Amino acid sequence: GQQVMQIPQYQHVQEGEDFTTYCNSSTTLSNIQWYKQRPGGHPVFLIQLVKSGEVKKQKRLTFQFGEAKKNSSLHITATQTTDVGTYFCLTYSGAGSYQLTFGKGTKLSVIP
Amino acid sequence: ETGVTQTPRHLVMGMTNKKSLKCEQHLGHNAMYWYKQSAKKPLELMFVYSLEERVENNSVPSRFSPECPNSSHLFLHLHTLQPEDSALYLCASSQVRLAGGYNYEQYFGPGTRLTVT
């Protein structure tokens, strides 16, 4: 079955530092989604990547999909305390498939 | 955000009890999902309903029984649960994927925190 490894599991950064989380799959992905879950909250959709090598930006967040469509990253520039939470990737094994797998998540703490 | 609601928000039940979790979405979506979120484990997909038909059932024990009476409502019926079933149960909804197309983003409810004693 499809396996997704997300690293790191935890990241503590000083406010203003950058942060990156990675998702790596053992198989080629059709697409990948990223979600954020604030402490005590529920996952909230951030972005979807579909194309090989795709890069998307949302203000201080940059999302990348690898050329081989087996890995993806989320990078936050100059973290703020509002970035605190757990970031998950969600992968799909086939276009339009409901065979989906969530990464374990990266829990981000920002020290003011 | 109140697009997806879940009740109850907290539930404590004994192993011999029968209870049901309810999810309702007000977004006009046609796919609904049940997830289990345990500490230190990734979100686990339990069931998917697309156009009110179950399309995914990830080897979930029969003590969990889903029901989708219409595209806006989803239930999870619980009976004779085990303490290891204690977790946050999340419901989500999305648009139904186009044939051969990509999955749409999911909208999650606030979850039901379940404790089995």
Image: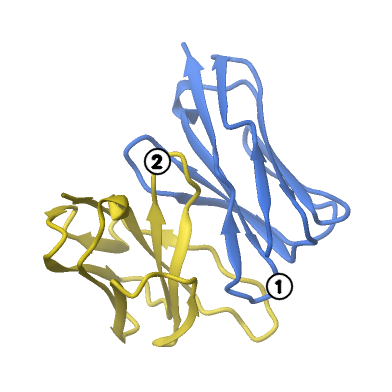
The chain drawn yellow is chain what? Answer: B
Residue A79 percent across, percent down from the top left: 57, 22
| Image spot of residue A67 (x, y percent) | 88, 52
The CA distance from mark 2 to mark 1 is 28 Å
Residue pictured at 57% horizontal, 16% vertical? A13
| Apparent side of residue A59 relative to residue B64 in the rendered image (left or right) | right
Secondary structure of residue under mark 2: loop
Reply above or below: B63 against A49: below
- Amino acid carrying label 2: it is Ala
Query: Tag on residue B39?
Result: 2
The image shows residue B71, relative to residue A108, as above or below, that is below
Q: Nearer the viewer, residue B61 or A8?
A: B61
Quarter holding residue A32? bottom right
The chain coloured blue is A
Res A89 visible:
yes
Q: Is residue A42 above or below residue B95?
A: above
Q: Is residue A55 visible?
A: no
Q: Residues within 10 Å of mark 1 (few under 14, many from 20)?
A: some
Instruction: Give how far across and how far down residue B46 sits, in percent.
Output: 43, 67
Query: Left or right: where does residue A86 sit relative to residue B28?
Result: right
> Could you say which is closer to the camera, residue A25 or residue A83?
A25
- Residue type (three-letter) at the residue carrying disc 1: Gly
Q: Residue at x 35, y 83 (%)?
A: B71
Q: Position of residue B3 (x, y in %)?
A: 32, 63
Q: Nearer the viewer, residue A30 or B25?
A: A30
Residue A94: which disc?
1
The answer to which quarter of the image holds residue A27 is bottom right
